[in-house]
Amino acid sequence: MFSSSIRISVDYLIIGCQGAKVNTYDPGSNNGAALIFKRTGITWSLARVVRDPAGSGGHALGSSVSINGNNIIVGAPNASSNIPFGGYNPGKGRVLFLNIEE
């Protein structure tokens, strides 16, 4: 799934992709991602791809995104750190807080 959540700031565009298959060691997993685009003049370029730090599938990272200045928040509602091998645990989740410039 592409663009499940989109937020825009003056010079940044964040696109959440909760179904993205970005896990390099398990190409079948859909752990999700968030794409950060930066505007320079009239051109938008991909500046960064935020991936699930746990690297497990099914976390739906990017299902929600937000931006405030240089700070972004990316949600992964299906993430759970207490289930091995990326299992699904309803009611658990993860929120990543990031600075765009880092």
Image (tube, rainbow, N blue to C red):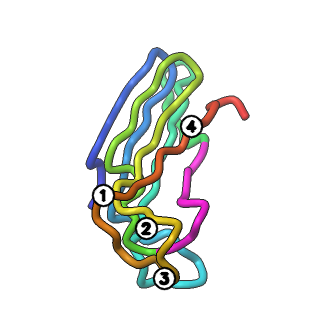
Q: Determine whether 35 is above or below 2 in the image.
A: above
Write down the residue under mark 3: 27
Q: Which mark is residue 31?
A: 2
| Residue 12: percent from left, percent from top | 49, 26
Q: Which range of residues does the magenta coloring cover?
A: 48-56
Q: Secondary structure at mark 2?
A: loop
| Residue 89: percent from left, percent from top | 34, 69
Write down the residue under mark 1: 91
Nearer-N-terminus badge (4/3) = 3
Name the residue at 64% across, 31% down. 99
Crowdedness near tag 2: few (<14), some (14–19) or many (≥20) residues, C-alpha within 10 Å: many
Front tag of 3 and 1 = 1
Q: Determine whether 100 is above or below 9 in the image.
A: below
Crowdedness near tag 3: few (<14), some (14–19) or many (≥20) residues, C-alpha within 10 Å: few
Q: Secondary structure at mark 3?
A: loop
Q: Determine whether 9 is above or below 49 in the image.
A: above
Front tag of 4 and 3 = 4
Q: Where, quadrant-wise, is the C terminus in this rendering?
A: top right
Front tag of 1 and 2 = 1
Q: Which mark is residue 97?
A: 4
- 17 or 79, nearer to the observer: 79
